[in-house]
Image: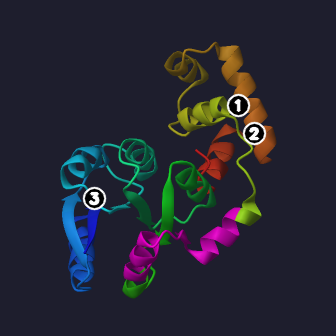
Amino acid sequence: MIRVLIAEDQAMVRGALAALLTLEGDIEIVAEVSRGDEVLVMARAARPDIALLDIEMPGSDGITVAGLLHTELPACRILILTTFGRPGYLRQAMENGVVGFLLKDAPAERLANAIRRIMDGERVVDPTLALSALSEGNNPLTERERAVLAAATKGSTIATIANTLALSEGTVRNYLSVAIQKLGARNRIEAAHIAEQKGWL
């Protein structure tokens, strides 16, 4: 039996996934959580073969959780199942030890098949997303530029961003200016929007 942990904040989706996978006969759901910050605790207790993670969850996002899970329980293979098919997410996920990345609108049998393939040591990535990630290229933003832009998405002032990130206002302006230039945006709001759409924040 393949032991699976499901982390999904929407109860109906989580229940449907569990029911569909249980029907497969060779898959057993050993844990279900609704929050990202519950994944590690449950994974330590249940020792799943595969963790099926959503990206956007309360407590912590799936990509961050994947990195922690990969470090602490390297034998547990990680599959992201999400509605957010942003190319940057795929890159971040792979850097955090994820071996599978599927979109939620994929047919149910594809998910069960992906779980089996991952157990056999394969990587499984939605083909359209993989193509999109390749065509987008690498994230041009540095870690600091990403942090400053992420803070700007909340509509914060330069002073607030500087205070939050412990930087001077001049440094924040410089990072924003470079990020705007790199993304070909007209202003910081547009730059943040572009970066968010590509999954680069």
Query: Disc 1 marks which amino acid?
Result: Leu
Real-space Cα separation, disc 3 to disc 1, in angstroms: 33 Å
- Which residue occupies 76% across, 46% down? 183
SS state under label 1: helix
Q: Amino acid at mark 2?
A: Ile
Pointers 1 and 2 in contact (C-beta within 8 Å): yes
Distance Cα–Cα, label 2 vs label 3:
34 Å
Mark 3 highlights which residue?
9
Q: Is residue 28 above or below residue 24?
A: above
What residue sits 43% from the left and 83% below the top?
A: 110
Q: From the image, state whether disc 3 or disc 1 is nearer to you.
A: 3
Residue highlighted by disc 1:
176
Residue 31 found in image quarter = bottom left
Quadrant location, the C terminus: top right
The mark lying in front, picked from 2 and 3, is 3
**Residue placed under numbered mark 2 in the picture:** 180
Please state the horizontal and vertical placement of residue 61, each as a whole percent of the image: 40, 48
Residue 125 colored in magenta in the image: yes
- Taking the magenta stretch, the answer to whether it contains residue 136 is no
160 in relation to 105, above or below: above
Residue 132 image offset from top left, x and y in percent: 68, 68
* Nearer to us in this view, 137 or 187: 137
Can you tell which mark lies on residue 54?
A: none
Left or right relative to 76: residue 83 = right
Magenta span main SS? helix
Q: Give the total of numbered labels.
A: 3
Q: Is residue 87 left or right of residue 3?
A: right
